[in-house]
């Protein structure tokens, strides 16, 4: 049923998230030594669900299309937003037009002088543009790709029914155990764009993305630290990216774009306010400008529609 056995980890992390949610909802621990770690774990595993969402819209998990559709509904309940809506802003705007005026998530929109504010508020700075792109794409796909729109509407309907029900049952629990972890997950997955691309050269064949190579980090984020190879082969399954990175990117990429520690990078870059280009020179922001139209025809990007994709890559590049 699974296309890759490695996605047993994906299913396990999803199960852990729902176990944390249900367990806290039932028992509502009041001892802070227990409640705080459980709440933090829920936020973290909701973020892992957001990463799984990212993986799924690029490379569906299951062999059967109907199972992928159901799984996207499950992920929607982990991520707190319809999984299909990840396609417009990420797959079609960011991936196809990285760091250009057609990239609604371009890092040049983060313009606070103190870089810590950029990483904290990047999600809120670009949120309106992401939503605008989503609604524009949905409107155009109503007649051009109704199956994709139908899947998105199903995900949204299930999310709203569950969310309203939880708030009716107990709004305090719903706020703490349901809504806040979802907001954290969405904030985290969008903010990663700043870490992965700010100060890189989008026009360079290898230096367009920053990679985080810690084995521990990549175990939990499904190898998404290897971001450059993901941009070159977005449909490549996450379990294959370390090998592909070592073969295609490591011999050519600037050494500063292979960061061994995401924590050390964040400390230097955001807390110590060192917003630099990958070569160590100061980051000079280009004019902000307006977003340009980026919406493609669905037949131009058949591999980028999540469960509705019909061109799923199945092998590593070069195989």
Image (cartoon, rainbow, N blue to C red):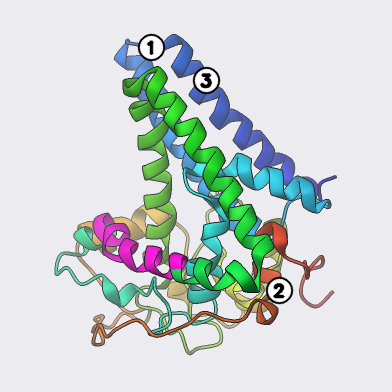
Stretch in magenta: 120-135
Instruction: Identify the mark nearer the N-term, 3 or 2.
Output: 3
Eye-nearest disc, 1 or 3? 3
Instruction: Identify the mark nearer the N-term, 1 or 3.
Output: 3
318 displayed left or right of 243: right
Query: Which residue is disc 1 drawn over?
Result: 29
In 3D space, how far apart are the residues under numbered discs 3 and 2 (Cα atoms)? 37 Å
Q: Are marks 3 and 2 in contact (CB under 8 Å)?
A: no
Q: Residues within 10 Å of mark 2 (few under 14, many from 20)?
A: some
Picture coordinates of residue 45 (x, y %)? Answer: 50, 37
Picture coordinates of residue 71 (x, y %)? Answer: 68, 44
Eye-nearest disc, 1 or 2? 2
Q: Is residue 277 above or below residue 170?
A: below
Between 219 and 232, the one lying in front of the other is 232
Res 35 → quadrant: top left
- In this view, the residue farthest toward the bottom is 203
100 displayed left or right of 151: left
Picture coordinates of residue 116 (x, y %)? Answer: 21, 58
| Quadrant of the frame with the C terminus | bottom right
Res 120 → quadrant: bottom left
Query: Which residue is disc 2 drawn over?
Result: 302
Q: Is residue 123 above or below residue 6?
A: below
Instruction: Identify the mark nearer the N-term, 1 or 2.
Output: 1
Query: Which residue is disc 3 drawn over?
Result: 22
Q: Are marks 1 and 3 in contact (CB under 8 Å)?
A: no
199 displayed left or right of 240: left
Q: Secondary structure at mark 3?
A: helix
């Amino acid at each position: 049923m699974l296309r890759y056995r490695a996605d047993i980890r994906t299913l396990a992390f999803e199960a852990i998230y729902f176990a944390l949610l249900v367990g806290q909802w039932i028992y509502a621990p009041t001892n802070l030594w227990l409640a705080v770690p459980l709440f933090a774990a829920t936020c973290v595993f909701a973020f892992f669900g957001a990463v799984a969402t990212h993986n799924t819209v690029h490379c569906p998990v299951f062999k059967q299309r109907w199972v992928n559709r159901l799984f996207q509904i499950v992920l929607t309940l982990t991520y707190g937003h319809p999984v299909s809506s990840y396609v417009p802003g990420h797959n079609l705007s960011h991936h196809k037009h990285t760091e250009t005026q057609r990239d609604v998530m371009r890092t040049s929109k983060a313009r606070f002088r103190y870089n810590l504010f950029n990483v904290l508020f990047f999600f809120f700075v670009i949120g309106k543009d992401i939503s605008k792109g989503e609604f524009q794409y949905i409107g155009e796909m109503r007649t051009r790709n109704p199956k994709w729109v139908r899947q998105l509407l199903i995900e949204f309907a299930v999310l709203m029914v569950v969310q309203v029900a939880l708030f009716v049952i107990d709004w305090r629990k719903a706020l703490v155990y349901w809504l806040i972890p979802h907001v954290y997950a969405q904030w985290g997955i969008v903010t990663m764009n700043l870490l992965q691309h700010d100060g890189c050269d989008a026009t360079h064949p290898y230096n367009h993305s920053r990679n985080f190579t810690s084995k521990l980090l990549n175990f939990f984020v499904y190898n998404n630290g290897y971001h450059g190879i993901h941009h070159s082969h977005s449909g490549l399954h996450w379990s294959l990216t370390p090998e592909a990175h070592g073969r295609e990117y490591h011999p050519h990429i600037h050494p500063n774009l292979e960061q061994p520690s995401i924590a050390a990078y964040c400390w230097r870059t955001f807390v110590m306010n060192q917003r630099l280009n990958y070569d160590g020179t100061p980051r000079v922001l280009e004019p902000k400008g307006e977003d340009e139209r980026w919406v493609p025809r669905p037949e131009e990007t058949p591999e980028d529609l999540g469960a509705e994709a019909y061109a799923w890559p199945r092998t590593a590049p070069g195989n």
